[in-house]
Image (cartoon, grey):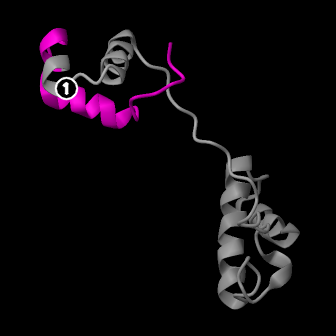
Amino acid sequence: MVMVVQSFIDLYGREPTPSEIGKMMEIKARIDKKRNPLIGPNKYNPEMKSPPKPPKDAPKRKPRLTQLSLENKKINRMVKLEMGIDKIAYVLGVKMSEVEFQINKHKMPRDDVK
């Protein structure tokens, strides 16, 4: 890299700016990678591989359920009371498709909601 900076000074007669140094480093890295493809991380160079993934039998985190809005809490209560989608939509004054979408989206009925 020192040779690249020195050649820039010889060519332009001034110090390069930090952005120019960054661009020169990118160009040099691209050229070096074309010359020797084993420089970058890949499957043939084990020292340059990415960190290992956790084992598959590691404990998985439970998916976090979203907070429910007031209307969704009402829908959840009505689903627990085994009301039909048509009755829930009528009581709330919304379309049946909206009620069905909310039920599927929030995985209702849920016990973690008060």
Q: What's the residue at 82%, 83% (across, down)?
A: 46
- The x, y position of residue 77, in whole percent, is 36, 16
- The x, y position of residue 38, in whole percent, is 75, 87
> 61 and 9: which one is in front?
61
Q: Quadrant of the N terminus?
A: bottom right
Q: What's the residue at 54%, 23% (across, down)?
A: 112
Q: Quadrant of residue 42?
A: bottom right
Residue 110 among magenta residues: yes
Secondary structure, mark 1, is loop
Question: On screen, 48 above or below 85?
Answer: below
The amino acid pointed to by label 1 is: Gly
- The x, y position of residue 66, in whole percent, is 50, 27
> 98 and 51: which one is in front?
98
Q: Quadrant of residue 6?
A: bottom right
Query: Residue at label 1?
Result: 84
**Residue 3 shows in this picture:** yes
Residue 55 among magenta residues: no
Question: On screen, 52 above or below 85?
Answer: below
Q: What's the residue at 79%, 52% (across, down)?
A: 15
79 displayed left or right of 12? left
Crowdedness of circle 1 by 10 Å Cα count: few (<14), some, many (20+)?
A: few
> 1 and 69: which one is in front?
69
83 displayed left or right of 104? left
Question: On screen, 84 above or below 107?
Answer: above
Q: Quadrant of residue 33?
A: bottom right
- The x, y position of residue 68, in whole percent, is 44, 19
> 56 and 18: which one is in front?
56
Q: Which residues are magenta?
A: 89-114
**Residue 93 shows in this picture:** no
